[in-house]
Image (spheres, grey):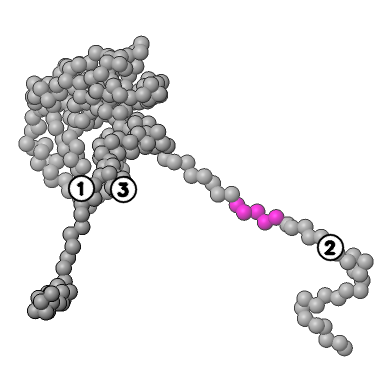
Amino acid sequence: MDPALLRERELFKKRALSTPTVEKRQATSDSGSHKKKKPKVDKESSSSSKLSSESNGSFNIKTSSGYKFGCLAKIVNYMKTRHQNGDTHFLTLDEILDETKLLDISMKQKQWLMNEALVSNPKIEVRDGTYGFKPKYNLKDKKALLRLLDKHDQLGLGGVLLEDVEEGLPNSAKAIKALGDQIIFVTRPDKKKILFYNDKHCQFAVDEEFQKLWRSVPVDSIDEDKIEEYLKKQGISSMQETGPKKVLPIQKRKKQATQRKRNFKTHNNHLAGLLEDYSDGVPVKK
């Protein structure tokens, strides 16, 4: 071979060795690789399995006490609302559950509502297996409200809370507006409104001379006991005597502590003549 070609060949080999090369790996075929890919877990299936495991476990939201009392509160509020709207007829438990959309409760909870919760609730009235709302004052119309306020006024019971009237009188706002000035509103310090009967027979004109005499007597510096004493001297009975008398609480007498004599056991009786008393100190020998 030509020596020039041999030299070129050697130089080519040296250049090839000095130049780094990166070989591409061949793509592995499905038949060649035996590695199994992990299957992707569906999020919905995992969440449903988690819920099923929780329902099969010790805690289930539909059997918890909070869910039970939440259903009871929903039923009582619904019965109150329908009573205020004028639907005062009684319903069976199935009708109540249907109208409140509580059809997914268990048979155990249904028995609890029927035998315990609704029967013992103070706002629910039971009649022959049917249920209705039980307000504090069961008022049918505005005339019934006026009779109630008049009765409270005659017996000296005061007024009636507006919230109690709204609870027991269907369409109460319309009825109160229709009564007009026959009712007096008074707002308490806690912002609650009270209804009073406006007795127009007690409205009479007082002579101006009597008004001046009334206002001329200062009573700011006089306590109630002195005022009552003055009225008794003048032969006038006070309003306190006509009203209900306050029963003072009976004070329990304190038992006097009696000093009991304690009996102490005496010991060493056989040395009675030999023992000496040193409670006053050591006796001085003469």
Residue 286: percent from the left, percent from the top? 87, 88
Residue 284: give x, y in percent of width and height. 83, 86
- Residues under labels 2 and 1: Cα distance? 74 Å
| Amino acid type, label 1 | Val
Tag 1–tag 3 contact (CB < 8 Å): no
Tell which of 39 and 50 is nearer to you: 39
The verdict on residue 197 being magenta is no
**x and y percentages locating residue 103 in the rendered image:** 28, 21
Name the secondary structure under disc 1.
loop
| Tag 1 residue | 219
Q: Is residue 97 left or right of residue 215?
A: right
What residue appears at the point 24 percent right and 27 percent down from the top-left corner? 77
Q: State the extent of the magenta-drawn residues as a range.
A: 256-260
Pointer 3 residue = 35
User: Which of the 4 quarters of the picture holds residue 52?
Assistant: top left
User: 219 or 247: which is nearer to us?
Assistant: 247
Element type at marker 2?
loop
Quadrant showing the N terminus: bottom left
Q: Amino acid at mark 3?
A: Lys
Q: CA distance from mark 1 to mark 3?
A: 105 Å
Q: Nearer the viewer, residue 21 or 122?
A: 21
Residue 160: image x %, image y %? Answer: 22, 29
Label 2 belongs to which residue? 266
Residue 238 in sight in this render: no
